[in-house]
Amino acid sequence: MNLTTPVSELTKVGKTAAKRLGYLGIHTAQDLLYYFPFRYEDYRRVVLIKDLRDGESVTISGAVELISNRRSFRSRKMVTEALIRDHSGSLRVVWFNQPFIGKALRPGDKVYLSGAVKGDLLGAQMVSPAYEKITSRETTSTARLVPMYALTAGLTQKQIRFLAQQVAPLAEQLSDWLPAKILGQYDLIPLPQALRGIHFPIDEAALKKSTERLKFDELLLLQLQAEDSRKNRLDHSAPQLTFHQSALQEFVGRLPFTLTKTQKIAAWEILQDIQKSTPMNRLLSGDVGSGKTVVAAMALYSAFLNGYQGVLMAPTEILAAQHFASLCRLFSGLPISIGLLTANQVSTVILNGAQRSEESLSQSINGERSFATLRMTVAKKEKEGFLKKLAIGEIKIIVGTHALLSEGVHFKKLGLVIVDEQHRFGVEQRKVIKEKSLTTSSQTSLTALSSAEERGTVTPSPLQRRGQGEVSQSAHFLSMTATPIPRSLALMLYGDLDISIISELPPGRKPIITRLVEPAKREKAYEFIRAQVKNGRQVFVVCPLIEDKQAGAIVAPLRGGGSNDKRSVLSEYDKLSQQIFLDLRVGYLHGKMKAKEKDGAMEKFKQGETDILVSTSVVEVGVDIPNASVMMIEGADKFGLAQLHQFRGRVGRSIHQSYCLLFTDSDSYRSSERLKYFETHHDGFKLAEKDLAMRGPGEVYGTEQSGLQQLRLAKLTDQGIIKKAREVAREVAPDIKKYPKLLEKIKEWERVVHLE
Ligand code: ADP
Ligand code: MG
């Protein structure tokens, strides 16, 4: 057995178990080593049976006197009953529905039992304690600090502990990738020791040391990556896009609204930044509806005024079309040609403010016409013609999806790339971006685009492949997100990134009335929804799963309240369409549908042909349905606050008073402090910080966020370690070649980040 041994070859792992481990991302022995516990149960205290006290969590050491299985009379459950004795007394023990225990333990066996003690009239009892025969082997589940792992259906703590114990000795085979000098200097323990210590710590001190070392590793890799992108960025030069003050003032003056203060600041920061000859790498973060698009438009306009092309890329067709419509509106009357390019529609369009009158423009674009209309307008033009116009620089501002990354898309002079909701781009698309980034042609801008990507949160640039002195051109890069990312987190994750934050909403927005609905009031909520629909409004229903018993659903360890409601899109759709709202038009949408079907479902909703849309979190992305006034969220405890906030942002986008109704099963209803906080708080940043404090960044921002899946342990609050990691990164980055093991690790890390 070695580190790369597949888990299926480990003792006691069959096909099914291997598959389940796969759901947890565990495929090899090394994956197991790096599958860290999320907490520990302290069962170190071994006490005598006579000293047991009600409510304590302890371990007893004794011999099995009696053990037998029986079926419970009333519930038909299998019950295993045992009597355990030590020299001070005897203890009753029961387990439910684990009949194998009746076989695994025989009278006379010496065992440890760990768990909570219940006292009643008949003396002390333990219900479903962890048990372990006393052998010469180190215990894993009893009489120690016991690791608790996140599980998926069909796997038990005991199984994972058993496997972790099997692979723990392999840690010795991992040669430490940190030089001894750094370990000494920063008081870090060797890697093998840390890996053993995180699974089976001897005491708190050992656990702390192990955790520190492993957190340091994660953070150092992030910081090295940031150092690398910074270097890489400085190796490129970007066009200096001069700030044309009067033209921009005029543009702002023509807007039908006044910019908010933070919009102005953000725009100013960006416009200053793109005047420099080093490529900008900036994140524009602003709550849903805070008005990022107009700020993006100002930057694009600046590129245009300097004779450069600008790109605005969105993760979905619908969003791209929306952006396109917004830009056409914002630039109407200006002599700018704007193009839209997406993959699923071979459609392209060129609108030229100079040629078209403002009226016809606003006719085809305004009035919230959907992109089906655009598609028709568009179909007339040939894609090839479009691409040619792009290549010769006739189209100045280009909106699109990742289709912009395909071969054959070339730009004449690309000055600025803006990516909206970058983290929403799929893994496949990121791969393409990565591949593109390896080409190093000069003028055509796939390079520019991808080197920009490199500097963004997707960072494929291997340290090894740094330029040989020649300075290549790169576009300025701006990414936008509505996920509020506190500055502290952004700095930790993306060291090489400047941030602009729009922290206020335009005045006059009505807050969305938010309620956590008691389970008993569900019927009332349905009545309310029906009334809204009868009034002409539309309704979103969001569910955490696509179908019941979704394979591989990981039981999130950190979300409290053992909730067992399994609301899924398909079952809710059935229920709502066949039982509750027979008279209304219900549709559904989820991520596993084909792109065409998804578009179709979305389109119908947009056109008002569906009243109620049941969907997964796919609606989270900035889709604009002004007529929707209710966002109903099932299994709300399954989502983070930042994500709930995104859902809530799907409504309240017009004059209609809007509502957000949260549902969870009765258990989590009672326990949900988090959801009650959400009822009364409407500031995305505050919600994000609360969430971060409670759940950590991986939970909050999703693990697909590049870099985050590598942050299993490190937290925002680890300021001390973050600082150390930054110091070390600065120190070693310049002569990274002197650290071959470190280089190896970086490569491995990038493989995981980008190819997972
Ligand atoms: P987001 O930040 O979510 O992308 P948008 O850019 O789509 O937000 O803006 C949301 C809406 O607010 C748009 O209809 C836009 O025209 C409008 N808007 C933007 N800035 C302002 C402002 N300063 N005052 C009033 N309305 C604004
Ligand atoms: Mg937006």
Image (cartoon, rainbow, N blue to C red):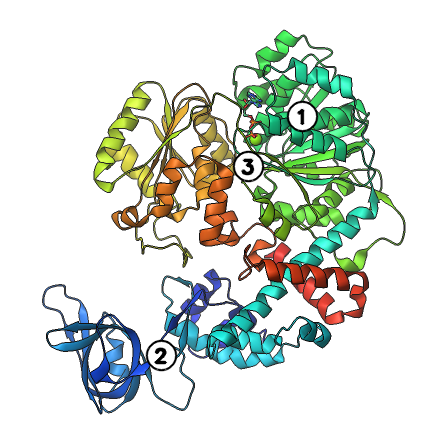
Q: CA distance from mark 3 to mark 1?
A: 16 Å
> Mark 1 highlights which residue?
297
In the rendered structure, which disc, 2 or 3, sits on the residue that comes first in sequence?
2
Label 3 CB sits under 8 Å from any ligand 1 atom: yes
- Quarter of the image holding residue 119? bottom left
Relative placement, left or right, of 204 versus 280 is left
Residue at the image position 67 percent from the left and 14 percent from the top: 253
> Mark 2 highlights which residue?
142
Q: CA distance from mark 2 to mark 1?
A: 61 Å
- Quarter of the image holding residue 175? bottom right
Label 2 with label 3: CB-CB less than 8 Å:
no
Looking at the picture, how far across and down is residue 236, in whole percent? Answer: 82, 45
Report the disc number at residue 482. Answer: 3
Residue at the image position 26 percent from the left and 25 percent from the top: 583
In the rendered structure, which disc, 3 or 1, sits on the residue that comes first in sequence?
1
**Outermost residue to the right:** 469
Is disc 2 placed on a helix, strand or loop?
Answer: loop
- Quarter of the image holding residue 535? top left
In the rendered structure, which disc, 2 or 1, sits on the residue that comes first in sequence?
2
Q: Amino acid at mark 1?
A: Ala
Is disc 3 placed on a helix, strand or loop?
Answer: loop
Q: Is residue 506 above or below residue 710?
A: above
Residue at the image position 56 percent from the left and 79 percent from the top: 170
Relative placement, left or right, of 234 versus 143 is right
Can see residue 347? no
